[in-house]
Image (cartoon, rainbow, N blue to C red):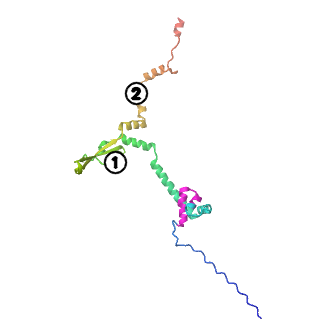
Amino acid sequence: MTAPKAKKKAKPTPKTPKTRDRSVPRVNGLLPKQAAFVAEYLISGNATQSAIHAGYSPKTAHVIGQENLRKPAIASLLAEKQTVIAARQDERLAQMELTKERVAREIARISFFDPRKMFAADGRPLAITELDSDTAACVIGLDVLEQYEGTGEYRHLVGLIKKYKIADKNSALDKAAKILGMFAIDNEQRADPLASLLQAITGGNSSAFQPVARDPAHDED
């Protein structure tokens, strides 16, 4: 009786190497969740919360969040986006910044306001959108009154009355003069030396003339 032949072990099938799934749409080279993670992180700056909001499991969000931050593609995109955001913020702050130069420029516009710039060459009043920047900066109010003729169904609009309110030019000139220090110069020029001396005497200034209790010349007599 012959012994049964031992069965040969089947050779394991070689594993097919994983290939990148090109069917999944990518944003800036990142998978959808990774791109969402970047967007959330730019808002909150919290890796764990960003991972949760991007769709990762809350149980692994902390680990995945830290891993995402270390991935070169994500780190590079974050740095690029943060630079752009910082530049835009600086630009907005610069536009809203209240500077001495900007205030002085607005005061100068009002100080040298010329009403002739509100009219066309033929004398026609210009619309608010037709005014140049310097003239428009002096307008602080606008009233528009509608004029009608007729009554009932025959009532119709025949014109508009526009009333512009202009900033106080005298007040602006006063502020401009203070900025230039004109009042200080003017006060120095108008100072009366005699009046200053009398003021010092009556004010009890120790450096002014002091009255003496007795005249030494009379002691010799």
Say left or right for 150 vs 40.
left
Can you tell which mark lies on residue 213? none
Work out which residue is located at the far front of the displayed protein and give it.
152
- Which sits in the foreground, 207 or 158? 158
Q: Which residue is mark 1?
A: 132
Say left or right for 116 vs 107.
left
Is residue 45 located in the magenta-colored stretch of the structure?
A: yes
SS at circle 2: helix
Say left or right for 78 vs 100.
right
Q: Which residue is mark 2?
A: 190
Which region of the structure is painted magenta?
Answer: 29-51
Q: Main secondary structure of the magenta part?
A: helix
Is residue 99 located in the magenta-colored stretch of the structure?
A: no
SS at circle 1: loop
Q: Position of residue 4 (x, y in %)?
A: 74, 90
Work out which residue is located at the far right of the displayed protein and give it.
1
Q: Position of residue 22 (x, y in %)?
A: 53, 72
Question: Whole-Å distance between the Cαs marked 2 and 1?
Answer: 40 Å
Q: Is residue 193 above or below residue 91?
A: above
Query: Is disc 2 in contact with disc 1, using a CB cutoff of under 8 Å?
Result: no
Q: Earlier in the sequence, mark 2 or mark 1?
A: 1
Q: Is residue 127 above or below residue 70?
A: above
How many callouts does the rendering have?
Answer: 2
- Which sits in the foreground, 16 or 158? 158
| Residue type highlighted by circle 2 | Arg
Q: Position of residue 2 (x, y in %)?
A: 76, 93
The quadrant in which residue 135 appears is: top left
> Can residue 109 be seen at all in this image of the molecule?
yes
Check disc 1: other Cα within 10 Å, few if <14, some if 14-19, many if 20+: few
The quadrant in which residue 134 appears is: top left
Work out which residue is located at the far bottom of the displayed protein and give it.
1
